[in-house]
């Protein structure tokens, strides 16, 4: 299967420039291209798997890196579409977060704290449909530390490429604040509603 790049209607953002967004989307497109290329390369090498065992094993390790980079960005950019909006405290998402952590703003606080961990990666809020619990993770790069099988509610990219152009090498905190200034919580609430519907 060959994956196609998606397009995103990202509006003008506060403290995140159009140039930064455009370059970020180009990086996403690279993940799609590289995943497809690795997929094709593995299939070719499997014609003689014994001879090509080492090359296949290295590509297998790289395969999930490219795939996760592709899919996480396909969650990241839509969170800006439609423009910024505050969380609806009466939404199912806000109620579920309050039940789990005691307040509707608890998820944002945890996302910010996790985002400030050192290293390239993602601050990700997951939901466990089985237990109705939320989980936080710092996903190293984009393929290390996932809660396997759990759907993602919020995906916050904290690789340097997300903030370096606008805020410099030490500008992660400013970027994280900008992310939440621009976050469309209604899109996140819709995502959470879809998760709920898929398990009902």
Image (cartoon, rainbow, N blue to C red):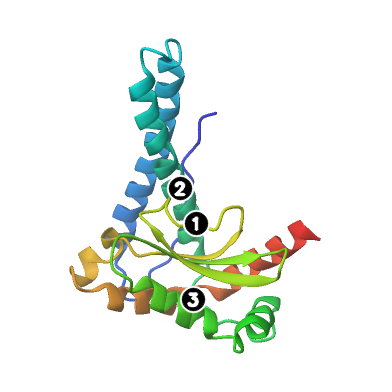
Which quadrant is the N terminus positioned in?
top right
Of 63 and 181, the residue lying toward us: 63
Going from N to C along the chain, the mark reached first, 1 or 3, is 3
In the displayed image of the protein, which residue is found farthest to the left? 169
Q: Residue at x 31, y 70 (%)?
A: 16
Question: Residue under circle 2?
Answer: 68
Disc on the earlier residue, 1 or 2? 2
Can you tell which of label 3 and label 2 is closer to the viewer?
2
Please name the residue that numbered disc 3 is placed on: 84
Mark 1 and mark 2: span between their CA atoms?
10 Å
Q: Residue 77, relative to residue 14: is it above or below?
A: above
Q: Residue at x 64, y 85 (%)?
A: 98
In the picture, residue 99 is in which quadrant? Answer: bottom right
Name the spot of residue 121 as percent of width and height, x first. Answer: 36, 60
Considering the numbered disc 2 on the image, is that residue within a helix, a strand or a loop?
helix
Secondary structure found at label 3 = loop
* Residue identifier under label 1: 146
Q: Is residue 179 above or below residue 7?
A: below
């Amino acid at each position: 299967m060959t994956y196609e790049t998606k397009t995103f209607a990202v509006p003008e953002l506060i403290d995140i420039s159009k140039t930064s967004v455009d370059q970020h989307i180009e990086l996403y497109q690279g993940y799609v291209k590289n995943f497809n290329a690795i997929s094709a390369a593995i299939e070719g090498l499997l014609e003689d798997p014994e001879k090509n065992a080492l090359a296949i094993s290295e590509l297998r390790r790289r395969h999930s890196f490219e795939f996760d980079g592709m899919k996480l960005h396909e969650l990241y950019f839509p969170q800006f579409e439609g423009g910024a909006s505050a969380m609806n405290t009466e939404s199912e998402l806000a109620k579920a977060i309050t039940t789990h952590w005691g307040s509707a703003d608890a998820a944002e606080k945890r996302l910010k704290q996790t985002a400030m961990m050192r290293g390239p990666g993602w601050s990700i809020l997951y939901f466990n449909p089985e237990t109705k619990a939320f989980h936080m993770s710092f996903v190293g790069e984009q393929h290390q530390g996932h809660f396997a099988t759990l759907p993602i509610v919020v995906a916050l990219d904290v690789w340097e490429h997300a903030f370096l152009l606008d805020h410099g090498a030490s500008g992660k905190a400013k970027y994280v604040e900008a992310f939440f200034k621009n976050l469309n919580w209604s899109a996140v609430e819709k995502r959470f509603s879809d998760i709920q519907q898929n398990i009902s």
